Image (cartoon, rainbow, N blue to C red):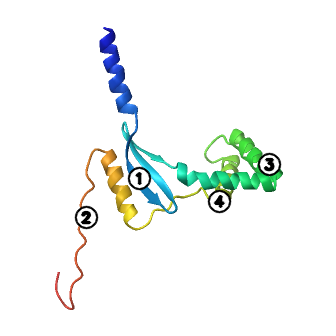
Amino acid sequence: MKLFRAGRLARFLAAIRPHNLGTVRGGAANIQVSRIAGGAALGLTDVLRPAILDLAEMHAEDPGTLTSLLEEIWELAGAAGGRDSHARHELDERVAVFLEAVGAHEVRVYNEQVGRLASLLWECRGQQAPAVVIPAQREGGAAA
């Protein structure tokens, strides 16, 4: 009986443990792509590192400003009840300002890395990326 449970536990852990499929270069940082049960996990440690350093710099330069902004966000988060509430809109605006200040609002992926990211995400679904055929440009006056 114990062996059966151990086998079930091993299968469960294998299913939920991320399987690292590869790395994509996103701007100046790496994005780790791992397969998890039912989807994908994107490792953004390299992307978030500069944002954390920006936060530390903001705190070193003026601790009061960073503290007051975070306190406002915390208070608005507690007050934001419904989706259409005024506090919810204020919260969204404050968070957007905060994210813009630390540069953590987007991850940019360029050129061939876009295709690599797409193929790794398709692989997370257990499928190969669909082949996309780009038609050749027609020569002067040639019909399709």
**Mark 2 or mark 3, which has the lower sequence index?**
3
**Mark 2 or mark 1, which has the lower sequence index?**
1
Tell me if residue 107 comes above or below residue 123 in the rendering. Answer: below
Give the x, y percent position of residue 54.
Answer: 68, 56
Amino acid type of disc 2? Val
Determine the secondary structure under disc 3.
Answer: helix
- Answer few, some or many: residues within 10 Å of disc 4's Cα (few below 14, many 20 plus, some between 14 and 19): few
Give the x, y percent position of residue 100.
Answer: 65, 59
Cα distance between the residues tagged 2 and 1: 22 Å
Question: Which residue in the structure is indicated by mark 4?
Answer: 100
Does the residue at mark 1 contact the one at mark 4 (Cβ under 8 Å)? no
Quadrant hosting residue 125: top left
Question: Which residue in the structure is indicated by mark 3?
Answer: 68
Cα distance between the residues tagged 3 and 4: 16 Å
Tell me if residue 105 comes above or below residue 19 in the rendering. Answer: below
Determine the secondary structure under disc 2.
Answer: loop
Does the residue at mark 2 contact the one at mark 1 (Cβ under 8 Å)? no
**Mark 2 or mark 4, which has the lower sequence index?**
4
Cα distance between the residues tagged 1 and 4: 25 Å
Tell me if residue 19 comes above or below residue 120 in the rendering. Answer: above
Cα distance between the residues tagged 2 and 3: 50 Å
Q: Nearer the viewer, residue 119 or 137?
A: 119
Give the x, y percent position of residue 28.
Answer: 52, 62
For the point 41% across and 52% down, which residue is it?
Answer: 23
**Mark 3 or mark 4, which has the lower sequence index?**
3
